[in-house]
């Protein structure tokens, strides 16, 4: 009787939350009992099993906190959504929210603030991060590095060299062979432009060298590669984050493809990813709040490392996390990262870069 009464109360609370028109996630601490029930029906955007290891993150979190695996197949929605599109979805669905959590590039947090989709909640362990790497409704999780994954098997079959630098990518023989996301819309595409601008001699405030370089590169660019188009050699050079490429490389090598993961020798940059909490998904607010805290714990951070991503707490902070050696198996050597630099993301405006790409690079090439 007691348990039946409890679940009746839970169901009633969920119905009230779900039906509260205009309700938003507030600053109150999460209720673990409500979160356990919400774990059975929550959804997320752009946090697939193979993005930063979110599949194992959700499984481990729910097994430890609630005793069951909440990583249902329908949990992950909108796997192809780009950062700006996630914000648009949160806003467009405010009266009938689909997803409570989403991975978003840090350059797009200001957009999310302006649109007003972020919840008014910060987990207590955000004190492990510098103040500019968290805020109401969002926390930084890990960093990626714009890198190349090269289908060397395909290139060598055509007598083409493997590119090792941004400069190498200008080879006319790579026409329409280089896949990259949209600058100003895709987090990886935007940071790739920041990286190529740095390599060309630009700075966060001087993008002219990057524009000049990109105008030469445009002929070689095409849509972002998928695992299928990469493996077939349709898009044999991919520009994405290193941790994405690391998982592809493992799969491809089992298929006999020589997939080479390369950090550009003329430089790249560290790009922070964040997790944002949808203020409108009241029905899953307690779960979302608890999960935001989880990703900053030692175990949550180490699960990102296991996948190949560098946990944010291992990169910044006064008491940095030391990642065990056995979890670094998907990491390239420290020497490969010697040309990678940290950029002040506050000086980068993703909207301005989108406009620059469209009106200076594409229109002028």
Image (cartoon, grey):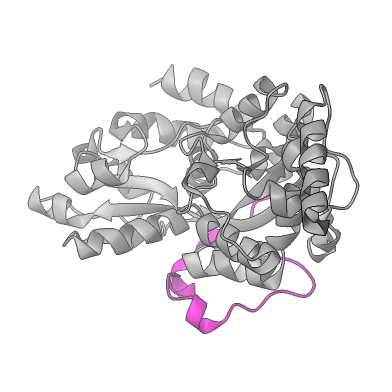
Q: Give the total of numbered labels.
A: 0
- Closer to the camera in the image, 293 or 136: 293
Check the image and report above or below for 98 versus 255: above
Q: Position of residue 180 (x, y in %)?
A: 39, 38
Q: Which residue is drawn at 18% across and 44% down?
A: 232
Instruction: Answer with left or right where residue 43 lies relative to residue 17.
Output: left
Instruction: Answer with left or right where residue 196 lies relative to residue 355.
Output: left
- Closer to the camera in the image, 221 or 34: 34
Q: Residue at x 70, y 50 (%)?
A: 37
Q: Quadrant of the image for the N terminus? A: bottom right
The picture quadrant where one finds residue 297 is bottom right
Q: Is residue 156 visible?
A: yes
**Bounds of the magenta segment:** 316-344
**Magenta-span inclusion, residue 322:** yes
Q: Where is residue 190 in the image (x, y as percent from the top left)?
A: 53, 38
Q: Is residue 139 visible?
A: no
Q: Position of residue 143 (x, y in %)?
A: 59, 57
- Closer to the camera in the image, 315 or 358: 315
The picture quadrant where one finds residue 236 is top left
Check the image and report above or below for 45 versus 40: above
Is most of the magenta stretch helix, strand or loop?
Answer: loop
Q: Residue at x 82, y 63 (%)?
A: 125
**Magenta-span inclusion, residue 257:** no
């Amino acid at each position: 009787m007691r348990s039946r009464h409890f679940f009746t109360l839970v169901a009633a609370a969920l119905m009230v939350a779900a039906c509260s028109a205009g309700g938003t996630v507030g600053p109150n601490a999460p209720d673990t009992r409500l979160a356990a029930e919400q774990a059975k029906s929550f959804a997320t955007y752009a946090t697939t099993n193979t993005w930063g290891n979110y599949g194992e993150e959700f499984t481990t979190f729910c097994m430890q906190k609630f005793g069951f695996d909440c990583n249902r197949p329908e949990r992950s929605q909108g796997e192809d959504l780009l950062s700006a599109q996630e914000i648009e979805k949160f806003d467009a669905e405010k009266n009938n929210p689909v997803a409570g959590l989403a991975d978003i590039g840090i350059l797009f947090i200001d957009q999310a603030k302006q649109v007003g989709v972020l919840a008014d909640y910060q987990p207590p362990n955000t004190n492990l991060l510098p103040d500019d790497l968290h805020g109401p409704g969002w926390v930084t999780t890990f960093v990626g590095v714009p890198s190349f994954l090269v289908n060397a098997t395909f290139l060598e079959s055509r007598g083409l060299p493997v590119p090792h630098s941004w400069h190498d990518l200008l080879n006319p023989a790579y026409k329409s062979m280089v896949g990259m996301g949209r600058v100003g819309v895709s987090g990886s595409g935007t940071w790739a432009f920041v990286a190529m601008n740095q390599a060309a001699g630009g700075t966060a405030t001087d993008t002219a060298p990057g524009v000049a370089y990109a105008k030469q590169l445009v002929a070689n660019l095409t849509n972002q590669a998928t695992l299928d188009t990469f493996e077939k050699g349709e898009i044999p050079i991919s520009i994405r984050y290193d941790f994405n490429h690391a998982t592809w490389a493992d799969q491809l090598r089992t298929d006999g493809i020589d997939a080479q993961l390369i950090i550009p020798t003329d430089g790249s940059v560290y790009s922070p990813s964040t997790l944002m909490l949808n203020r409108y998904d009241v029905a899953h607010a307690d779960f979302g709040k608890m999960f935001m805290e989880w990703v900053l714990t030692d175990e949550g951070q180490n699960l990102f490392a296991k996948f190949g991503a560098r946990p944010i707490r291992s990169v910044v902070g006064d008491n940095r996390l030391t990642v065990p050696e056995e979890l670094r198996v998907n990491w390239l050597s420290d020497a490969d990262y010697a040309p990678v630099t940290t950029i002040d993301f506050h000086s980068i405006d993703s909207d301005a870069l989108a406009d620059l790409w469209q009106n200076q690079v594409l229109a002028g090439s």
